[in-house]
Amino acid sequence: MGIPVSSRGDGAPLLLVSRSRLFRECLACRLAKGRRFRVAAAFDGLTPALEESAAHAAELLLIDGSSLAEEDLALLRGHTADTPKVVILGLARGARHLQTYVEAGVAGYLLRDAPLSELTEALEAVLRGERVCGGRVARDLIDRLTALGRRARRRQAMEALRLTPRQMEVLRLVAQGLGNEQVAQRLGLSPFTVKNHVHNILECLGVSDRTEAVAHAYRRRWLG
């Protein structure tokens, strides 16, 4: 059941989730003063809030990020309805689950020290169908995505090391459309040796033909 709060009015109905009763009641009062939002009910857990959102015709679900438990991540991923739109308030800097929230379709993120004016603006933007990410949260997300990209590039580079320098030379020439005999002439090798190199390249990359090998190499940016 929803926990009674002191917010009244005709604003957009909002559900609030936090383990802290003081946080719930204080925030409900502050939002009520603006008359743009009305806390229809407050909950100390995410599960009942999602279950009762339809009964309250809630347009927004505002979650205290410090109250999210590990199992709540699965609930967020499973919340695919357009309403209520989810906003998380109180993310710690560098929150390790930020990418999971993004993938789950959370519409807004604000840090713990965000002022009430920023929260109100964020809620209004989310109601308009926008996605909101506080400045520092956005930087944290970009930093995380950059780190993931860096790791992916390192992984691709390590994968490329499975090929010998000679095999990479052969692959580059194959990518230029040269046949085995032409590659052999260019590298001063016998066609038989080039054929063996191509066979080993295909086997190493787990592909069935030269075209797939070249496509594989381009996807991983081995060939520029």
Image (tube, rainbow, N blue to C red):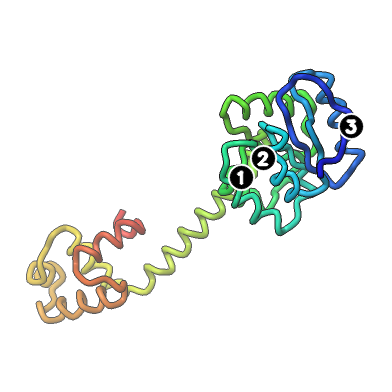
Estimate the x, y position of residue 98 in percent, counting from the top left.
64, 48
User: Looking at the image, which residue is at 34% across and 56% down?
Assistant: 221
Mark 3 sits on what residue? 26
Q: CA distance from mark 1 to mark 3?
A: 29 Å
Q: Quadrant of the N terminus?
A: top right
The numbered disc on residue 141 is 1
Q: CA distance from mark 1 to mark 2?
A: 6 Å
**What's under tag 3, amino acid-wise?**
Cys
How many other residues sit within 10 Å of disc 1, few (<14), some (14-19) or many (≥20)? many
Mark 2 sits on what residue? 137
Q: CA distance from mark 2 to mark 3?
A: 24 Å
* SS for dot 1: helix
Residue 183, compared with residue 113, is above or below; it is: below
**What's under tag 2, amino acid-wise?**
Val
Q: Nearer the viewer, residue 155 or 208?
A: 208
**Residue ranking furthest to the right:** 22
Q: Quadrant of residue 32?
A: top right
User: Looking at the image, which residue is at 15% across and 80% down?
Assistant: 193
210 left or right of 156 in image: left
Residue 156, compared with residue 46, is above or below; it is: below
N-terminal-most mark, 1 or 3:
3
4 left or right of 172 in image: right
Estimate the x, y position of residue 216 in percent, counting from the top left.
30, 62
User: Looking at the image, which residue is at 89% across and 32% down?
Assistant: 26
216 left or right of 3 in image: left
